[in-house]
Amino acid sequence: MPVYPIDNTANKQVRIRRLGTYLAQRKLRFKSRSPGTALLIQQMRDFPVGDHDDGPDALEMALRLMIELVNGRAAAGYAVSRLVSF
């Protein structure tokens, strides 16, 4: 499994708030009736005043990494629609 570094120079709250656009446009899907999904949704609802924000933080980093990888592969000639489906 390849390991990719993630550079987090922006404030955590700013990074997590970026998820709002994807959520509002319904571009993210979650597994229904999953304990992990329920925990993630609760942490997103409680953000920024909740005790825990690890789930939303990890989701933002995963989404950002995916976008960076797709953009890099798209530049190399791969079809983006085949790599990612929202």
Image (tube, rainbow, N blue to C red):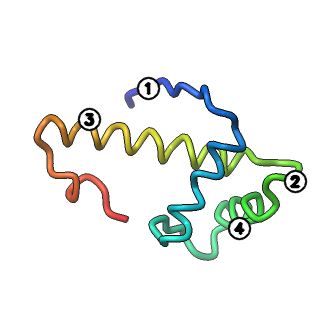
Amino acid residing under circle 1 = Val
Going from N to C along the chain, the mark reached first, 3 or 2, is 2
Helix, strand or loop status at disc 4: helix
* Res 38 label: 4
Amino acid residing under circle 2 = Val
Residue topped by disc 1 = 3
Q: Alpha carbon of mark 2 to alpha carbon of mark 1: how far? A: 32 Å
The local crowd at label 4, few if under 14, some if 14 to 19, many if 20 or more residues have their Cα within 10 Å, is some
Going from N to C along the chain, the mark reached first, 3 or 1, is 1
Amino acid residing under circle 3 = Gly
* Res 86 label: none
Between circles 3 and 1, the one closer to the viewer is: 3
Between circles 4 and 3, the one closer to the viewer is: 3
Q: Which quadrant of the figure contains the N terminus?
A: top left
Q: Alpha carbon of mark 4 to alpha carbon of mark 3: how far? A: 32 Å
Residue topped by disc 3 = 72
The residue at the far left in this view is 77
Marks 3 and 2 in Cβ contact (< 8 Å)? no
* Apparent side of residue 37 relative to residue 1 in the rendered image (left or right): right
Task: Identify the residue shown where x is 87% and y is 54%.
Answer: 50
* Res 49 label: 2
On the image, which quarter does residue 40 sit in? bottom right
Q: Alpha carbon of mark 4 to alpha carbon of mark 1: how far? A: 27 Å
* Apparent side of residue 7 relative to residue 16 in the rendered image (left or right): left
Helix, strand or loop status at disc 1: loop
Task: Identify the residue shown where x is 40% and y is 44%.
Answer: 66
Residue 77 versus residue 21: which sits nearer the camera? Answer: 21
Q: Alpha carbon of mark 3 to alpha carbon of mark 1: how far? A: 16 Å
Where 71 sits versus 31, above or below? above
Helix, strand or loop status at disc 2: loop
Task: Identify the residue shown where x is 81% and y is 52%.
Answer: 48
